[in-house]
Image (spheres, rainbow, N blue to C red):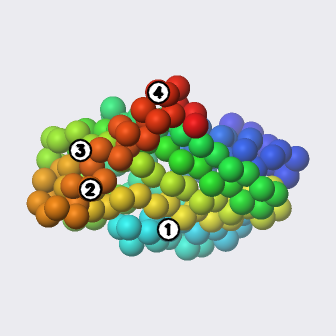
Amino acid sequence: MNDIDLGRHSPSAVWEEHVHAEFVLKDADAILRTMVAEPYVFCIPSGMCAKGRAEVREFYARHFLPNIPSDLKLMPLSRATGSDRLVEEFVVRFTHSIRMDWILPDLPPTGRKAEFVLVAVIGFRHGKVSHEHIHWDHAALLGQLGFIDQPFAHAGVTSAARLLKLCDGFGVC
């Protein structure tokens, strides 16, 4: 794949290329081509963070890409875009069939299904991704997978399904 001049593309186009490199190509180098020289990625609830090109490449190549369940689905709900920031809301579904340290550090696979809302806040500089802040309801996710059994964890368990229903099931609010 040749490098492309991302400086001429909108944040949405760059983000779509980035997500394509993550979930379709599953290629750390293709992901890095969409990013600035010194990016960072921070999965807020799990505490997984990578800063700088070498760490970000290692995050994608060793921790993220090989640890995506084969049935993982991202259903876009909404997107807000500015000149240097994009916020995207997804419903994420998967079966916890493999270790996923980027989202569930040090927890063994349970075989259970999970569904939750994930929000990505993406920064841009010079037409490329500068950073990703990834947020999700960690208590609801841990509750669905059986790692915690507390009333506060169950409050968000049906939130993703309810949000999809509110969005008329069309995937975009």
Check disc 1: other Cα within 10 Å, few if <14, some if 14-19, many if 20+: some
32 or 161: nearer the eye?
A: 161
Residue 50 can be seen, yes or no: yes
Please report whichever mark, 4 or 3, sits nearer to the chain's N-terminal start.
Answer: 3
Instruction: Write down the residue under mark 3.
Output: 96
> What label does residue 155 carry, if any?
2
- Pointers 1 and 3 in contact (CB under 8 A)? no
Q: Secondary structure at mark 3?
A: loop
**Residue type at numbered disc 1:** Phe
Please report whichever mark, 1 or 4, sits nearer to the chain's N-terminal start.
Answer: 1
Q: Residue at x 31, y 39 (%)?
A: 94
Q: Quadrant of residue 92?
A: top left
Instruction: Write down the residue under mark 4.
Output: 169
Whole-Å distance between the Cαs marked 1 and 2? 25 Å
Q: Is residue 123 above or below residue 171?
A: below
Q: Is residue 55 left or right of residue 38?
A: left
Whole-Å distance between the Cαs marked 4 and 3? 24 Å
Q: Residue at x 32, y 61 (%)?
A: 138
Q: Is residue 29 above or below residue 48?
A: above
Whole-Å distance between the Cαs marked 4 and 2? 21 Å
